Image (spheres, helix red, strand yellow):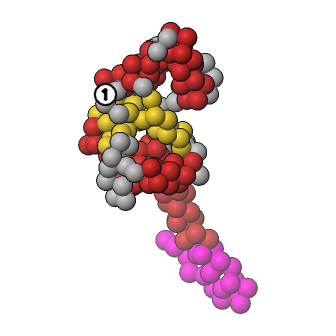
Amino acid sequence: MSKTVKSLIMRDYKSRIAKDAQEWPDAMVISIRGVKAIETTKLRHVLAKKGIKITVIQNALARKAFEGTRLEALKDLLTGSSALAYGGESVVEVAREIVGAITKMPGIELKGAVLDGIVFKGKAGVEELSKYPTKDEAIGRVITLVLSPAQKLAGQIKGPGSNIAGIIKAIETKLEKGEEVAKVA
């Protein structure tokens, strides 16, 4: 293969994967070699509905294309038949979907993934990554943790206040009826 063709392939990888020249997403490396063509097409179709893409890559050219990017950490995982899965809201969502797809298509091999520069190697690493919260889930957890003490505090403040309001209401009712209110010593 000539340098021109290799250059075109690397440029194609960059244009498909990166949103712009500087913004490369986190991704995972899989092998779909043992999966039949019809099943691969079904998998791609299901993942495409969720904004996840799979691109079969040539390892040597991908290593060169990924140099100086977030995906450079995947270079050791690029052996044998490789495909890059990326997109969706995050690589966590990609990992969840592909780990779920393994039950129907056991021929998929999980090679690894990268999230914020941290490499998750092999099936165990990708399964661990799939259990991480997505960005939206993490934000929801933080908001819950922040609001929880405030809600408890409001309940503590409201509790005695409602008791006092009940006592005042009872005194007011007695006075309206003309009854005497016992004085506290």
Residue 89 x, y percent position in the rendering: 55, 42
Q: How many marks?
A: 1
How many neighbours does mark 1 have within 10 angstroms: few (below 14), some (14-19), or many (20 or more)? Answer: few
Q: Identify the residue position indicated by label 1 in the image.
A: 79
Residue 183 x, y percent position in the rendering: 55, 76
Q: Spot the residue most to the right.
A: 176
Residue 169 x, y percent position in the rendering: 65, 77
Look at the image and tell me whether residue 25 can be seen. Answer: yes
Figure quadrant of residue 126: top left
Kindly identify the amino acid type of the residue bearing the numbered disc 1. Thr
Is 6 on the left-hand or right-hand side of 34? right
The residue drawn where x is 62% and y is 71% is 165
Residue 173 among those drawn in magenta? yes
Residue 49 among those drawn in magenta? no
Residue in the foreground of this view, choosing between 140 and 107: 107
Look at the image and tell me whether residue 144 can be seen. Answer: no
Is 82 on the left-hand or right-hand side of 8? left
Up/down of 86 relative to 117, above or below: below
Question: Majority secondary structure of the magenta segment?
Answer: helix
Residue 92 x, y percent position in the rendering: 44, 42
The residue drawn where x is 53% and y is 21% is 9
Residue in the foreground of this view, choosing between 116 and 44: 44
Up/down of 184 relative to 161, above or below: below
Q: Which residues are magenta?
A: 166-185
At mark 1, the secondary structure is: loop
